[in-house]
Image (tube, rainbow, N blue to C red):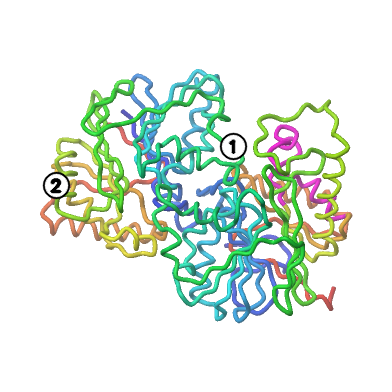
Amino acid sequence: MAIDQTESNFEKLTLNSRVKLTFWGVRGSIPVPGTETGKYGGNTSCVQFFTGVNDPVLIFDAGTGIIKLGEHINNNYKNNEIHIFITHTHWDHIQGLPFFAPLFNNKYKIHFYSKNRSSSSLQDTIFKLIEEPQFPLSHQKWKAQIFFHELNENRLNLNPNTTIFTADLNHPWGANGYRIEYKNYTASYITDTAPFDLMLLGKEFIGSPPDPQSKLSSQEKSALKKIEKGVLELCCNSDAVIYDTMFTRSDYITFPHWGHSTFEHAFGICKEAKSRKLVFFHHSPRRNDHELDEMLQKYRQIASKSSLEIFAAVENTSLILDEPETT
Amino acid sequence: MKVTFWGVRGFVPVPGRDTSVYGGNTICLGIKGDQGTNLAIDAGTGITNMGSSLMNKEFSRGEGNFSMIITHTHYDHIQGFPFFVPAMIKGNNIKIYGSNLCEKSLENVLENHLTPIFSPMQTLRNFNANISFSRLEPGKSTKIGNFQLEVTELAHKVDWALGLKLEGIQGSLGYAANVTYQKPADFKKAIEFFTGVDVLIHDATSTRLYDQIIVGDHSQDARDAVKIAGESGVKKLYLTHFHHTYTDETLEQLLELTKKRSDEMGYKELDLSLAREGNSFIL
């Protein structure tokens, strides 16, 4: 696959020991197979923070992209410890899990993480996902050792080299973003979230866009401010921020209640947080390769005066993180 | 009747360059009757493209009538439903036909698929179209537009999946997208049911151990499909519901191996093809 992100920051799948973000699935909503998505890819969300084949595997979300990653792990990796961080359990973030090969191999220890929700435990949700009559292989067929972790704190010391931070995002029902600190490297994973001018978090269903005339209550205003502050902290001085940019500005005006963001918003957050790279992610299933090329070009131009570098996530490629000393 | 393959995969959608010839969308077969009947068999991700293709007609005005037959409720047969645009438009009528599996009604299964934990749609009631359900029963014929539909229970893992026969003015179509024949009686039942159909669309995967199929334990040719088609006297067989690990190249090999197997089994007259996403045929 040609990589024309032009910079040397991107590479094809390799097992060198550079620290990088590997994109296994880049879409939102639903997988979109077909020739029109061949370049950016059609698998749903799954990103890996890669530090080396001897290290624990760090995975963010389990859309269909995780299926290929599972084979990759089985074939190439030396470490048997896998950590999967889930932003939320909407289909496009978990639907690859039932086909994740390491689950069927007893040598692995697989840890699942998600923000604690009083209404449903992560274990119940995942087990429910793979029950008849919707799926034939229940968790009893899994051979790996499985651990579920519900995060109550916003900080998790995973191992001496790795700390994970989390915060709420603005998405119907709920979602949480992550920040990964590994040695001196930092990356942020912010999907799915709407901008912060309309309260979506905690609402189970929002049927139509709210009346633009209706004013936010002071309670909603402060809740939104709190979410924004959390997101800014996750992105603060980050080497690379992967951000939900499913929407164009006109999409957002039509569907402000769907819980997705725009380039303009992502750009604003990254500027304020002094992040170094912004990676478009959670591409709309309706956007083909040509349209994504155009979007990238357009927004790169808009951002050209800024020090923020702009990229779009491309499946089966990795964004190499800069060594901190050299930045 | 015009038959279109909108999705030909089993298990899970597989986007990517190495599935771009035969397609990566999960199972959905579109049927258009000569007098305008619109019908889908199964609602894998292929149904999203079918839905979009309908949107420049009466469906965009909220005047469309659509029938959907769900042959069983594993994800690959229902996961496209929440993205089927005609279901979002007020005024359209969507009638969903299916059967009850695992003591849960089809409606329950779809509701479960849409709960806020899994989907921002929350419930079927948030789709604007009129959605209704109708239960299919083996041995009973159902009229859908100009078609007569008959179903049977085919062996599938612990439960079963529907096999169906759709009879139109110009001919009849058989469909068995997901079937795991375990014992001779399972074959016998399917052969009796499909005897007399003009075209059969059948599961390409042959195995006795459905639990192992996802991790790849199945035969490399479509021997079960060939046996059913051959013994039923079907002239034209399309293989579908391809395993998600199969690339375009593997599928070409599957076709070659299956043709060889078909000759060995003595069905030299059987015309055998792979279902290919986007392709149609007229019956």
**Does residue A199 appear to the left or right of A112 in the view shown?**
right
Q: Height in image: A282 above or below A164?
A: above
Instruction: Name the image quarter holding residue B101.
Output: top left
Q: Is the Cβ of the residue at disc 1 closer than 8 Å to that at disc 2?
A: no
Q: Locate residue A318, reporting x and y percent.
A: 65, 66
Chain of residue at mark 1: B
Q: Residue at x 57, y 53 (%)?
A: A44
Examine the rendering and report whether any part of residue A317 can be seen.
no
Examine the rendering and report whether any part of residue A288 can be seen.
yes
The residues bearing labels 1 and 2 have C-alpha atoms spaced at a distance of 42 Å
Q: Please provide the residue range marked out in magenta.
A: A244-271
Residue A183 numbered mark, or none: none
Q: Amino acid at mark 2?
A: Lys
**Residue designated by label 2:** B188
Q: Locate residue A13, reporting x and y percent.
A: 59, 70
Chain of residue at mark 2: B
Q: Residue at x 33, y 48 (%)?
A: B240
Q: Quadrant of the C terminus of chain A?
A: bottom right
Q: Nearer the viewer, residue B172 or B88?
A: B88
Q: Locate residue A56, reporting x and y percent.
A: 62, 76
Q: Locate residue B130, reporting x and y percent.
A: 50, 23
Does the magenta-highlighted stretch encompass residue A310? no
**Does residue A63 appear to the left or right of A323 in the view shown?**
left
Residue B121 numbered mark, or none: 1
